[in-house]
Image (cartoon, coloured by chain):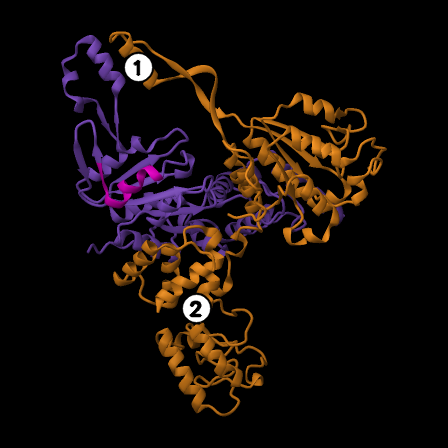
Amino acid sequence: MLIHFFYELRAAGVPVALTEFLSMLEALKQRVAFLSAEEFYYLGRMSLVKDERHFDRYDRVFAEYFEGAERAFEKIMAEVPSDWLRTLGERLMSEAERQQVEALGGWEKLMQTLKERLQEQRERHEGGSKWIGTRGTSPFGAYGYNPEGIRMGQDRSRHRRAVKVWDAREFRNFDDNVELGTRNLKMALRRLRRFAREGAASELDLDGTINATARNAGWLDLKMVPERHNAVKVLLLLDSGGSMDDHIQICDELFSAARGEFKRLEHYYFHNFIYEYLWRDNQRRQVERTSTEQLLRTFNADYRVVIVGDAHMSPYEIMYPGGGVEHWNEESGASWMQRLTQHFPRLVWLNPIPQDRWQYGHSITMVRELVGERMFPLTPGGLAAAMRELRPRSSAPAPAETEPVD
Amino acid sequence: MSETRFQGSDRYVATDDLMIAVNAAITLSRPLLIKGEPGTGKTQLALEIARSLQRPLLEWHIKSTSKAQQGLYEYDAVSRLRDSQLGDPRVGDIGNYILKGRLWEAFESDVQPVLLIDEIDKADIEFPNDLLRELDRMEFYVYETRKLVQARHRPIILITSNNEKELPDAFLRRCFFHYIRFPDAGTMQRIVDVHYPNLKKDLLSEALNAFFRLRETPGLRKKPSTSELLDWIKLLVTEDIDPAALRGEGGRGSLPPLFGALLKNEQDAHLVEQLVFMQRRANR
């Protein structure tokens, strides 16, 4: 029966391997857990799930699967008139009473008993300690107290003692495409690391030394090499336009993560779209500008370009000369973008707008075409995919990955 | 089958799920990978397991330059080369230049030891892959002396990670995994009780309130964690701070005293100061 659980986990996208499944079975055999549902839940989680981002998926499958038993139960539930379960106020129990309430036994027994009870019971019931209904101490029904009870139609656990911890789904936020803090950003950016030895020789090169010593007829000849460090160069272009105000926090975090990660990071701002000039400092943008021509001359093709913007604007701002919101641009934004993509083969566009809303913005589709479909959502998954795109490759650029995978 | 079970200790509060994880790892002698926010007691766990089970503890702290081979053994070719230049007689036996690593020491131990591999994510991406066979079979081969080193007792291995790098799948498959969550208020109370048993009740509850309030401040770069809370309480006790001062005049209207122990970077401190300032103005 657990084999089915295994396949459901895989179907839900939790990468479980056979060896992990076997080790869970072994742990069960060794009686590490005493087969209460909760202990089994923890045991399964520690042996099958190796990434806290997958905890939520595990929770969902676990709930689904181990309440397959409960689904059978829900079928019966549908037959239980809902007014039985209508809450009329919670019965307050003393500590002594709580202690009197003893669990009825294991999970299976609970189910079995329930079915039997349902067959026996024919009337609305409240407050007792055997029948199904509200406010009682029977293990079935809502708003009552029994440490091993099953909840029926109750949205939260009143006494925080319900058996099912997986219902709480406390790891929801760890799933891939929601939470983004500086730390995840840094982790994603780290994929771009490319170590190279450059600069002053400060480390002993053991292989080189041995080689040189051998050539030197056994007389010691020390060789030094420079220390390894991250040699990747990044050019960050940030949209600071009005529609980006909603995304200030995330961009700020991305920026600080990138600054911590890359030694050679250059950044420039633009408004809505890139035209003939950009600026470094948002406060002094009218005074200190850098022309895009100069940008193309200054940074050579091995810079990796990351453009951050929502690409949300009027299509005129991209397609036509003079379409810019702030000034008259001689050439269209599209031709500037073409120049950028030609000059920098490694270029991605990160979009803070959730990916499922991209199709509603006409300009977003246009920008995606302009950057060769290399637009990624600003989520840990999307950022990881973007970094994969930017990673040095020996061959010509492969077809762009549009679906972010983790 | 050994009857060793870890139950937490007088210095360490272990939640149920953590105890199941540790005991499963001990029973099946498989490595246990521990992740969690910094400061939630990942490293401390290994110390406490060793202490409560009375096992020797071997610590292997990983740095960005660490290599898997260093945990097994190192062949000190440079000293051998130097000795040969000086005509030292030791040079004839290559075994003199084999330095044992932490894993070798753990394999050789007379009683089952606890081996802590701390912050494995700091090392190179290939590092965990290079340890697959060693952790699986608990043996390795010393090429220089043509000797197979096998574990006398499979050590209890704890591996901590701060999630700075993703670990390879093949490695993860061989481990059990536990994620230490940030403790809720109830667990936190137990943790503080364990560390400062004679703390005044009102000071503790005020300190915890102030702490959780601070953690909920939106936009903090580094949220204060358990270890910072413990440090802060220590400071409060030594400075003999009045619980009333923690509450602040306007409830949430002022900064907690000695907040430098909780907030570790200036942007965060600045942010909280600003929030407090705005609050005060609103209260006026």
**Which residue is tagged 1?**
A211
Q: Colour of chain B?
A: purple
**Which residue is tagged 2?**
A65
Q: Position of residue A135 (x, y in %)?
A: 52, 80
Q: Is residue A356 magenta?
A: no
Badge 1: few (under 14), some or many (20 or more) residues near its Cα, within 10 Å? some
Residue at x 27% of width, y 12% of height? A214
Q: Are marks 2 and 1 in contact (CB under 8 Å)?
A: no
In the image, the chain rendered in orange is: A
Element carrying mark 2 = helix
Q: Is residue A134 above or below residue B278?
A: below
Q: Is residue A32 left or right of residue A381?
A: left
Please state the chain letter of the residue tagged with numbered disc 2 in the rendered image. Answer: A
Tell me the quarter of the picture where residue B84 sits: top left
- Give the amino acid at mark 1: Asn
Tell me the quarter of the picture where residue B126 sits: top left
Residue at x 43% of width, y 63% of height? A8
Tell me the quarter of the picture where residue A371 sits: top right
Q: Is residue A57 above or below residue B171?
A: below
Q: Which residues make up the magenta segment?
A: B129-140
- Give the amino acid at mark 2: Tyr
Q: Is residue A149 visible?
A: no
Q: Position of residue B166 (x, y in %)?
A: 45, 42
Mark nearer the viewer, 2 or 1: 1
